[in-house]
Structures are given as structure tokens and as C-alpha cells.
Amino acid sequence: KGRLLVDLSLGEVYGPSVMGGARVPVATRPLEEMAHEGLPHGTLRRAQVLGEWPSWPEDLQSARGRYAACFLRYLRGSYTTQWDFLLVTHADCVATALTMMPSHAAQVVVGVEYGGMFLARSRGRSRFAPPARLVQAQHLLAWVMRCGGGRAPAAERAFGDKDRVVDGPELKVLNVHAAASDGWEVQLHGILLKSTGVEQPGTDEAVGRKESQIKRLSTSWSF
């Protein structure tokens, strides 16, 4: 059995760049309905909501900082508890999280296909180096580049076969704890990267093992 966490800190950019000019009221489904719909009885051991909604209007820079901090909390928690976790989120969060990994800090994410993802596996560091060093996000976060004009409100978004990341200004300096992302092997699937002026799809290093790897991921979280 697994645990389901609905983390409000991983939600969409809560501002006009995604939601449109008018403030969107918070609307969520009942947790029990959301947790058990489509799942066999007894699949989940526990479900809970955590985190906080961002304040309206949230800009893109603030949202990316929120994603980075939240992702590193889960990454560190996974390492210290020795539990795997699976985060299901959206394109901007996927792009930000990927560029927090040292192996992709110099990459630019231009798009995330439907179902696009990356798998991160620890290389076996014995512990985090205390105290966690602070680095500037401009050295860790690749700029999520502009791609194809403005983004419409959520109900009107459609970009063919992929979810484009939100347009926006370059990130300013943001201090984040980076130690949690050191020492990880990263495999990609369905993520478009910018390299020397050419879009290149990120793929798994071992495509044949992807489905079995996903099945082995546990959703037992306790942070």
C-alpha cells in the first residue's frame, strides 16, 4: 500500500500568466473522492493534504522558487528516509525540478510532452554534507526559455502534443539549498532540451527499463 499526498505547494503558477487577469477561486475535490477514484480498493494506506496555496497574484519567478524549494525538500526527504517518491505535476514544475539536478543545471527546457518525466536515482552518497551549502539559483536553474508567444488561461491552453512551459522573464538570484540534488543519476523521457540552438528530446538512457522502473517506485511518503 502507498500514501498519497496532495501538496498545495506544487500547484500551477497562481497568477495572470496562467490563470488570466481575474483571480481564480480555489476549487478542489474532496480528498476521499480524489484519492480513491480509479484505484482498486485498498491501494492507498493513507491520503492527506499538505502545503499552502500561493498568494495571488503570483509571478513566474516566485512560482519557480516555490517549485525548487519544494522539490528539494522531497529529494532530501527521500534520501534520508530511503523511500522512493513519485511527484505528479505540470510542465513548469517539471522543468524547474530537472534544472535543480547538477547534471542538467546548464540545460534549457523548452517543452514537456504529455507524460514527460525524469527519474532520479541516488548514486549512494552516505550523507549530506553539513551544513548544506547555499548556491545562487542562476548557477543551478537553467532559464526556462520563451517558446511561442503568450500563454492563455488554463481552459484555453492547447499546444498540440506537448505542454509548453510558461513564458516569462529570466529568473533573478534565488538562494536555495543545493546539497540535496548532488550525487544523483538522472534519466529523461519526453522532455525537450535546448542545446547549441537545436531542440533535442530527452530520452531514457535505458528505454526498455522505463516502465519497470516506474512500477517499482513507491508512493510511501512521510515528510
Image (cartoon, rainbow, N blue to C red):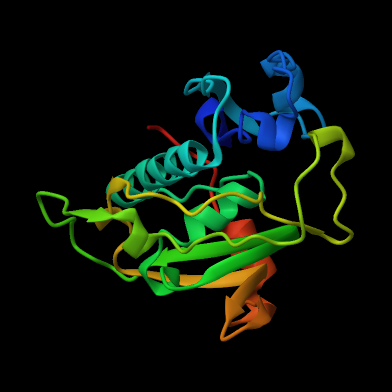
Give the tally of numbered discs: 0
Q: Position of residue 151 (x, y in %)?
A: 76, 45
Instruction: Name the quadrant of the C terminus.
Output: top left
Q: In which image quadrant can residue 146 be found?
A: bottom right
Image-based side of 179 in relation to 204, left or right:
left
Up-down: is 93 above or below 11?
A: below
Nearest the eye: 115 or 108: 108
Query: Which residue is painted at 48% across and 20% down in the image?
Result: 52
Query: Which residue is painted at 40% across and 32% down in the image?
Result: 222
Q: Position of residue 86 (x, y in %)?
A: 56, 48
Query: Which residue is painted at 56% across and 59% down in the image?
Result: 144
Q: Where is residue 59 in the image (x, y as percent from the top left)?
A: 54, 35
Image-based side of 173 in relation to 141, left or right:
left
Instruction: Name the quadrant of the N terminus.
Output: top right
Nearest the eye: 136 or 186: 136
Nearest the eye: 52 or 151: 151
Up-down: is 135 above or below 46?
A: below
Q: In which image quadrant can residue 141 be found?
A: bottom left
Query: Which residue is painted at 50% across and 30% down in the image?
Result: 9
Farthest left residue? 130
Up-down: is 223 above or below 127?
A: above
Image-based side of 220 in relation to 134, left or right:
right
Image-based side of 163 in relation to 9, left or right:
right
